[in-house]
Amino acid sequence: MKKDKLHKFRKIVLQYSMALFLTLFSGGLLVILQGEKPIYALKEIFYGAFANPINFGTTLRWVTPCLLVGAAGVIAFRSGVMNMGMEGQMYLGALVSAILGYSLELPPIFHVLLCFIGGAAIGAIYAFIPGILRLYFHIHELISTLMLNFLAALFTEFMVMWVILGGKHAENGSQSIATPEISKTAVLHPLIKGTMASTGIFIAIFILLILWFFYRFTVKGYEFKQMGRNLAFARQGGVNVEKNYILVLTISGAIAGLCGAIEVLGSYHRFIPYFSKNMSWDGIMITRIALNNPLAVYPVSLIWGALKAGALHMERVTKLNRLVVNLIQMFFVLFVAVDYESIAKAFWEKIILPFKREAVRENTNETVRECRQEKLGEKREIR
């Protein structure tokens, strides 16, 4: 058992070390091709993320949704469910929380809680749809959740433009496509004045801790893990796969909807169509890098948030575009997915060992030839 854990630990260390090295090499080469020095670009990213309270607040602002979409991704992918619809669930959660935020007048704590519940509930309901499509119509959730993203984005934009605003946005251009600002009683307290960081980050941290406890110490968490490892084995072991499948999707959707609510209550204070900027894809990549481990989502999200905040500063003071950072993130996701242990083993068995055997064979043949020549020389001397 200890040997297995040690082997797994070594494999993870090798995987991340190689991924980091290859990412730095590829990213450095990309920066050089853009006409900048890699060290200088890295320095500016770090400065933009941590140099002062305002910059650090911007980093925390981006860490919050990274933690939440990472949590939504963990509970789905670790359980073997491909929830690719977190973005759509976020949009609906954000819209519902914004409507509850500006249309009601309640005491501060109750108002915030109601917005959270509304956002999480609509996210869970929207995630429930692909579950039904999978179980009763055999439509894979990978396809249905992806398609439902576009439906949610267009639906929320329609609701804002033509139902809430009544088409009046056209006078002021596309920038005015947004819901009214939410009441002050629904606003989350800012963490650092002058930034969009809010107390929503503590909710995100708490949710990941609950997920860790859930998977480690509960029977239902064990059933979810078994579903992710082997669906047929879990069914044979008595796990109600259909019920758990729906449960996984709805919980994941609820967390994504809550993420949308926190974006509205903590950062934008209104719903703006297409505010996400591919946050759900960030969650998928964070989950992949964290190997579906809730605790590993913390450091990965911090790095992700720092890169997002630092990229904005880097773009202002260098020749580089912020998309360079996105490419470097993609490189890391790609390289961390490579099985370096298998590659090293194949390289050893296919190239190194045959080469060594050939070298040993040649040495042996050479030794035999030398021995034969020595014996022939001795015979000639005797004669």
Image (cartoon, grey):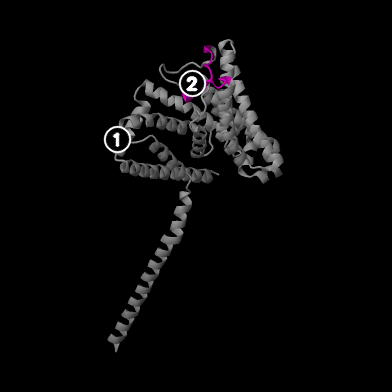
Q: Quadrant of residue 323?
A: top left
For label 2, the residue is 171
Furthest toward the front, the residue is 171
Q: Is residue 32 visible in this depiction of the protein?
A: yes
In the rendered view, tell whether residue 27 sits above or below residue 269. below
Q: Which residue in the protein does label 1 denote? A: 40
User: Of circles 1 and 2, which is in front?
Assistant: 2
Foreground residue among 190 and 216: 190
Q: Does the magenta-highlighted stretch encompass residue 166?
A: yes
Q: Is residue 11 magenta?
A: no
Q: Establish if 181 lies above or below 67.
A: above
Circle 2: element type: helix
Which residue occupies the foreground of this view, 267 or 43?
267
**Residue type, mark 2 in image:** Glu
Quarter that holds the N terminus = top right
Q: Position of residue 61 (x, y in %)?
A: 45, 24
* Residue 359, position as x, y percentages in the image: 38, 67
Place of residue 192 in the rendered image (x, y in percent of width and height, measured from the top left): 42, 18
